């Protein structure tokens, strides 16, 4: 069984028109790759992922593979500090009246 002929593509490196997976002139890939960080398809010749910004072909960091927190303590920390400051202020003002 023969494989279907690939449509012609322009090489992102040398601008040669070719078919197949690699450029016959310079050997660059004519097909897009997959981002290692977010699994988005990359355009041929892309140096960075358009979705997550990771360098094309780079291994994602451990932090890149962890789910992002949905607020949690870090998101509510300013509110906690403000509430404590308000309680201290009210205690100070209330203590001076009596």
Image: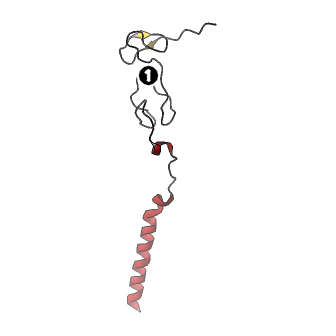
Is residue 13 found left or right of 41 in the rendered image? left
Residue drawn at the location 42% of the way across and 36% of the way down: 54
The front one of 65 and 44 is 65
Q: Quadrant of the C terminus?
A: bottom left
Residue drawn at the location 41% of the way across and 78% of the way down: 88
- The residue tagged 1 is 44
Q: Residues within 10 Å of mark 1 (few under 14, many from 20)?
A: some
Q: Residue furthest left?
A: 14
Q: Position of residue 87 (x, y in %)?
A: 44, 77
| Location of residue 14 with respect to 92 vertically, above or below | above
| Location of residue 89 with respect to 62 vertically, above or below | below
The front one of 90 and 73 is 73
Q: Position of residue 28 (x, y in %)?
A: 41, 17
The front one of 48 and 83 is 48
Which secondary structure lies at badge 1? loop
Q: Quadrant of the N terminus?
A: top right
Q: Residue furthest top?
A: 2
Q: Quadrant of residue 48?
A: top left
């Amino acid at each position: 069984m023969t494989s279907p002929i690939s449509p012609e593509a322009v090489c992102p490196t040398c601008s040669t028109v070719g078919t197949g997976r690699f450029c016959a002139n310079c050997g660059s890939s004519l097909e897009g790759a997959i981002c290692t960080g977010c699994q988005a398809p990359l355009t041929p010749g892309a140096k960075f992922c358009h979705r997550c910004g990771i360098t094309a072909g780079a291994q994602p960091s451990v932090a890149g593979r962890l789910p992002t927190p949905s607020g949690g303590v870090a998101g509510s920390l300013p509110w906690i500090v403000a509430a404590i400051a308000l309680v201290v202020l009210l205690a100070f003002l209330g203590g001076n009246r009596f």
